[in-house]
Image (spheres, helix red, strand yellow):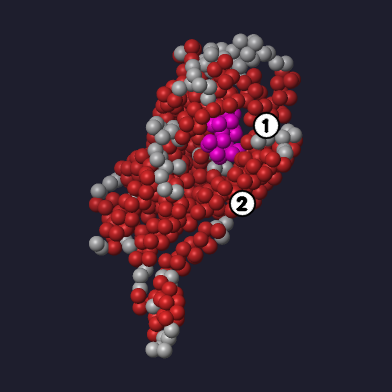
Amino acid sequence: MTDPQIALMMLGLFIVFVFLGFPIAFTLMAMGIGFGYYAYFDARRMWRSFDRLDETASTWDSWSTWLEGFINNRIFDLFVNQTYTVMSNEVLTAVPLFLFMGYIVERANIVDRLFSTLNIASKDLPGSMGVAALITCALFATATGIVGAVVTLMGLLALPQMLKARYNPSFASGIICAGGTLGILIPPSIMLIVYAAASGVSIVRLYAAALLPGLVLVGLYLVYVIGRSILQPSVAPRPSKDEVPDMPLGKLWMMIVTSFLPLAFLILAVLGSILFGLATPTEAASIGALGGILLAFVYRAMTWQRLRESVYLTVRTTAMVCWLFVGSYVFSAVFSYLGGEHVISEFVQSLNLSPLMFLILAQLIIFLLGWPLEWSEIIIIFVPIFLPLLAIFEVDPLFFGILVALNLQTSFLTPPMAMSAYYLKGIAPPEVRLTQIFSGVMPFLFCVLVSMVLMYVFPQVVFYLPELFYGR
């Protein structure tokens, strides 16, 4: 077999092992080292120490020299260097800080106050409880960026109230599942940090570029929720005074000040300091982590147990992301050295695709990968395969990254592997069936596809803020 054929076999075996359930980070590292040992095998270099042995050398000297030569393969040097590169990556330093902010906010009892306030404030809107749940999900997802945490917490908090208010179970479930995934896209998104580290695109420009598409997607969700509530009132009955009591205006404003404004101020402080160049993403993430701790103290929700849980979850998730990067860097370096990237590039160019056709093909592949894989694995492992092709088709990596972020919303919403649905089913009342949750997320999936089409048709939605803030 030729080296490029071995590279393609390497990629195929990796996909097989993923579907068999092997841990992805360690599979990447094992396959990178295994195939890399073959790729960098140089017997003359590895066992040149034998030249220094004479005829009187003992058996022990011979065996130790052979073992030294066996591990004297450049793949081990590559593995160490790539590990150091990941650990010293300044962009990735923001990941644990944003994660810590999210886990602290999750445990600060802010969300229940926020949902109650928005529920009362929006009671005159059609589908008011759904609107309140969706806006709460969007704000909470922005503060945490952790899909499972948002869906689970909102499922425990909002879903029982919506069902008690006679909301259609499918409609209510879809709102929570779709709202919980918004943290992937809306800054400060951890996914965008990971994409920036993988692609070399400025994280500051990515955040600016993602802001309008994120708001567009939230707007489409709200239009659907309100529109369906108007056209089909039975799915979202108006609340009675017993369910949502009238509130004096002064007291309502006080509730907004104490529940909505602190979280909104924290998000705007973090995001604004990044967008206006007042702080780097890492410095802003530090501010956000400190702000999350202060909010938890203000709401009297900070305990030693909650702090310890937040630190543990932060370390665990950060370690997963870092080892994925290490495995991916080693795997992709060997894959490229064997000629795999060249083969894929030649194949794609032979299809004579237009830039639009290439974008559609790439997004379709990412959409399909979203069924078995998490967003982190798609961004770190598979997106780098597309990155060298962007220059060939004259596609801006910034634009491509925002399309991928939009696309990955679908990975959490598309049956049969819709993780948001499974998160919600795990804590939903028994009468809410998984098929109902699946049917509830489908209209929101259509909203995501509409938003992607809008990005294709009006790319200035992506480029407007980066060009406004930082020039071309």
Q: Which mark is residue 282?
A: 2
- Frontmost of labels 1 and 2 is 1
Amino acid found under the numbered disc labelled 1: Asn
- List the residue tagged with mark 1: 109
Q: Which residues are magenta?
A: 134-154
Relative height, residue 20 to residue 106 (above, below)? below
- Is any atom of residue 459 visible in this view? no
Front one among 370 and 281: 370
Quadrant of the image containing the N terminus: bottom left
Q: Secondary structure at mark 1?
A: loop
Q: Position of residue 332 (x, y in %)?
A: 40, 57
Q: Residue at x 46, y 13 (%)?
A: 232
Q: Position of residue 125 (x, y in %)?
A: 57, 17
Q: In which quadrant of the rendered view does residue 102 lie?
A: top right
Front one among 132 and 331: 331
- Residue 425 painted magenta: no
Category of crowding for the residue at label 2, using alpha-carbon neighbours closer than 10 angstroms: few (below 14), some (14–19), many (at least 20) = some
Magenta-colored segment: predominant secondary structure: helix
Nearest to N terminus: mark 1 or mark 2? 1
Q: Position of residue 323 (x, y in %)?
A: 50, 54
